[in-house]
Amino acid sequence: MPIITGEFTVAMQPEAMSAVAADSGVGRMSLNKHYQGALQAEGKGEMLAYMDRAIGSGVYVAVERVTGSVEGRSGSFLLHHTGIMTRGAPGLTVAVVPDSGSGELTGLRGNVNIRIEDGKHYYDFDYTL
């Protein structure tokens, strides 16, 4: 599986929760990402999150549509994010949603590792096509 690496920026905007979820303590954010490097793309999505700051445990899930190109092949695909924080220890899985690839990215499979170094966001995308 090839692994491509690059940088990305992310902007998150708080969004209103449904009336049913409003009292749950769960937050909702929209995501707007710009990927650079071998992945030239825009990512748009939604995230739900909960954090107990007193003990440092929480969770987030997100779905993101990525539109652009992977090493020159154009199309779009979905990413599914699952993040778990256990008393300050992070765990994160970001995977391509099966059968979500379109255009030249039809059949795309893989996982994304996200790194934050010196305040910058980086991706390592391990994929097959």
Image (cartoon, rainbow, N blue to C red):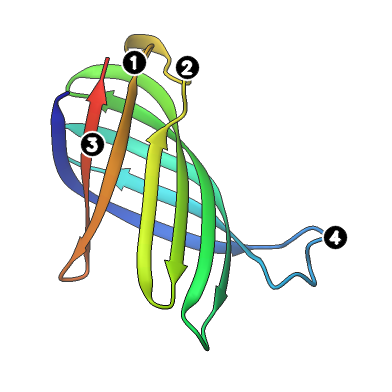
Q: CA distance from mark 3 to mark 4?
A: 36 Å
Q: Quadrant of residue 101?
A: top left
Q: Earlier in the sequence, mark 1 or mark 3?
A: 1
- Residue ID at (78%, 62%): 21
Q: Determine which residue is flagged by label 2.
A: 99
Q: Quadrant of residue 2?
A: top left
Q: Nearer the viewer, mark 1 or mark 2?
A: 2
Q: Secondary structure at mark 4?
A: loop
Give amino acid for label 4.
Val
Q: Position of residue 105 (x, y in %)?
A: 34, 15
Q: Where the N terminus falls, by quadrant? A: top left
Q: CA distance from mark 1 to mark 2?
A: 10 Å
Q: Residues within 10 Å of mark 4 (few under 14, many from 20)?
A: few
Q: CA distance from mark 3 to mark 2?
A: 17 Å
Q: Determine which residue is flagged by label 1.
A: 105
Q: Earlier in the sequence, mark 3 or mark 2?
A: 2
Q: Determine which residue is flagged by label 4.
A: 20
